[in-house]
Image (cartoon, rainbow, N blue to C red):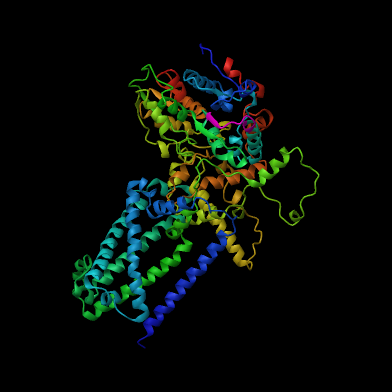
Amino acid sequence: MSEELIVPTMAEMMAEGKQPEILFWVGSAGSYDDRAKKITKAFVKILNKANVNFAVLGTEESNTGDVAKRAGNEFLFQMQAVMNIEVLNAYEVKRIVTCDPHSFNCIKNEYPSLGGNYDVIHHTQFIKELMSSGRLTLEGNTYKGKRITFHDPCYLGRGNGVYDAPRDVLKKTNATLIEMKRHKGTALCCGAGGAQMFKDAEPGNKEINELRTEDALETQPEIIATGCPYCNTMMTDGVKFKEKEADIKVLDIAELIAEA
Amino acid sequence: MEYVPNIIFAILLIASIGYFASNVKKLIRNIKLGHKVDANDHKPERWKNVVNIALGQSKLVKRPVSGFLHAIVYVGFIIINIEVLEIIIDGLFGTHRIGQELLPTSLYGFLIGSFEVLAVLVLVSVTIFWIRRNVIKVKRFFSTEMKGWPKSDGNIILYFEVVLMGLFLVMNATDTVFQTANSGNVISQFMAPWFSGFEIQTLHTIERVAWWLHIVGILIFLNYLYFSKHLHILLAFPNVYFGKVVPKGKLNNLEAVTAEVKLMMDPDADPYAAPPETAEDEVPAKFGASDVMDLSQVQLLNAYTCTECGRCTSECPANLTGKKLSPRKIMMDTRDRLEEVGKNIDANNGEFKDDGKQLLGDYITNEELWACTTCNACVEACPVSIDPLSIIIEMRRYLVMEQSAAPMELNNMMTNIENNGAPWPYNQMDRLNWKDE
C-alpha cells in the first residue's frame, strides 16, 4: 500500500498515558494470512481516514482460541481466552472492533463468563457507525451501478443476528445489491467454519465453497462482497475453481469502502 | 346389561390413559438420565418463544407450502379434539351428543360445523402430505436415515389422520338425530344421501361402529405417540421453552475446564495440594460426551421432540455436498440410543448394565462429527428449536480431550496455537509485521 498507515499499539498508547476509543482486534488470519492482511490494511486505511483514535495489541495479541473450541479443545480455548483477557483487562479495554466474525463471536459471547466483558463490534458495524455519524464520507462513485452480492458470514449473521450493517454499508456505495437465493438466515456456509479451514473435507461429492460460489454466480455479480477473512479465502478459491476470476472480484467490505 | 357399553368404555379409557402415562413416566426418566440444566434465565423470552415458535409456528411457515398445510392439520387437530370431550362424556354416562342437549342449538351447530369443515381441510392437507412423501418424493424424506421404521412411521400417521377424520364424518352423516336437527351438518349432509338406502337400524349400527372406532382410534393414536416420531405434538412446547435463548454462535464454556485452567494460571496454586475430601467418591468429570448420559436433559428432550422433518439436513452445507453428516440423523441416533439405554434399565431392575455400546461409534461416527462447519444452519432451520450442533460439539470435545482423536491436521493447528498463538507456524513476534509490508 502506497500511503503510510498509522497503527499505534496499546503499549505505545499506554506509555504516552493515552487510552484509545477502540481496540482493533486483528486476529490470526488478519495478522498472518496474505489475503487477509490486505483486509486488515484496508480497514486501517478507513480508520486513519476517519481519524479514529484506535490501537492494536500487536505482538501482545494471541489467537482467540475460537477455532480450538470449535474443534472440541476446550482446554486450549480457555487457556487462550484467559491469557487474552488478562492483557485486555490490564489495558482497561472497553470497546473492540474486529474484521473476523469468529473473533467477534468468541470475544463477545464466550469471553464474558471467563472475566472478559467488552463491547465488541464487527468492522461492518463500525464502518456503518462512522458513516452515520459523518466521520466517514464516500467521495467517489467507484461502485455506482456495479452488481454486488453479499455473502453472509455464519458467525455474523445466523450466529449473532447481524444482517443489516454490512448491507447498509454496501448500499452507501450506490452499488446494485443483489441477494443470493440463500441469504441472511438461510445463507449457506462458505465451508471454512468449525475448524474446517484447517483440514481437508470429509468425503463427499462437492466442496462446500464450490456450492456457495454457484449460489453467488447465479446473481451474475461483478463483485462478491465478504465480511470474514475465511469466507474471503473460500469464495476466492471458488471463483478460481469456476474460472471466473477475470470477471468477478471477491472483496471484503473494508476493501470496498477503502477504495470507494 | 344396559351399562355394559359404559363399563367397556371406562375400562378402555382408563387402560389407554394408564398405558400412556406409564410411557410418559419412562420418557421423563430417560430424559433425566442427562445432566441437569439451569433454565431459570430469560424467562420472558422463553415464553415469547413458546407463543411465537411453538403455538404460532413462526418457523414452520418459512417454507410456505408445508407450513400452511401443517397449520391446517395443527389447528384441525386441536379444535376437533374438543369433540373428544363430548365423546368421553357420552361414553361414560351413556348419553348421546350431550352437547346438543346442553348447548344452544346454534352454538352446538357452529362447533360441529367448524369441526366438519376442519375435518375436510385436514383430509385434503394430509392427502397432499401423502403425495409429497410417496408420489413427488420430496428429497428430504428420502435420505439414508429415512429407511425402514422412520419412513413407514410418517405414512402411518397420515393414514391415522385419514381414518379418524373419515370416521368422524361418517359418524355425523349416519346420525339421524343430528341430521334431522340440521344444524352443523355442513359437510355430513352431503354424505347422508350415500346411506339413504339403509334401514334405520342399520344406519344406527353404522353410526355406533364409526363412533366406537373413532374413539378407539384416538386412544390408539395417543399410545402410538411414544413409539413414534410424532411426540412433537406434545414435546414441541417444552422443547421450545428450553431452547437456546443466547446468540446461536455462543457455545457454553465447560466449567470443569475453567476450574483447571484457573488452577494452572494461578501462581499461588500448590500443585501438590491434597484434593478436597469430597472429591474422593466422585467420579472424575468426563469432558464432552460419548454416550447419552453425558448429554444434557435439554439435548435428550431435543431427541424425543424431533419429528424427523429433515429441514435441518436439507440446509446443512456438509450434507448438501454429499458428506455423511446429517443433523437429523444425529437427533435420531441420540433418541435410538436413549431408548436402548431405557430398555436396558427396564430389563435390569432400574439399573443400567454396561452393554458395551455407546452413542459415539456405535451410532454416530467420527466422520460425521468432523464434517460439521458449526454454521448453525440446522439450528436456524428447526421449527421447534432443536440444537443438533450442541451434541456434535459435545462429542468433538470427548474425541479431542478424552481420546486425543482429532484429525491430524487439526492437531497440528492446535499445536501451533499452543506454541505460537496462531493456527499456523508463524512467530508470535511477527504478528504486527503486516503494518510495514
Magenta span includes B48: no
Depth check, front residue: A257 or B369: A257
Say which quadrant the C terminus of chain B sits in: top right
Residue sitting farthest toward the top: A2
| Image quarter of residue A31 | top right
Magenta span includes A92: yes
Depth check, front residue: B202 or B48: B48
| Image quarter of residue B262 | top right
Depth check, front residue: B82 or B294: B82
Residue A252 visible at all: no
Vertical side of A74 occupied by B96: above or below: below
Q: Where is residue A109 in the image (x, y as percent from the top left)?
A: 55, 39
Q: Where is residue B72 in the image (x, y as percent from the top left)?
A: 32, 56
Residue pictured at 66% horizontal, 44% vertical: B257
Residue pictured at 51% horizontal, 51% vertical: B331
Span colored in magenta: A88-97
Residue B335 visible at all: yes
Depth check, front residue: B213 or B377: B377
Q: Where is residue B90 in the image (x, y as percent from the top left)?
A: 33, 77
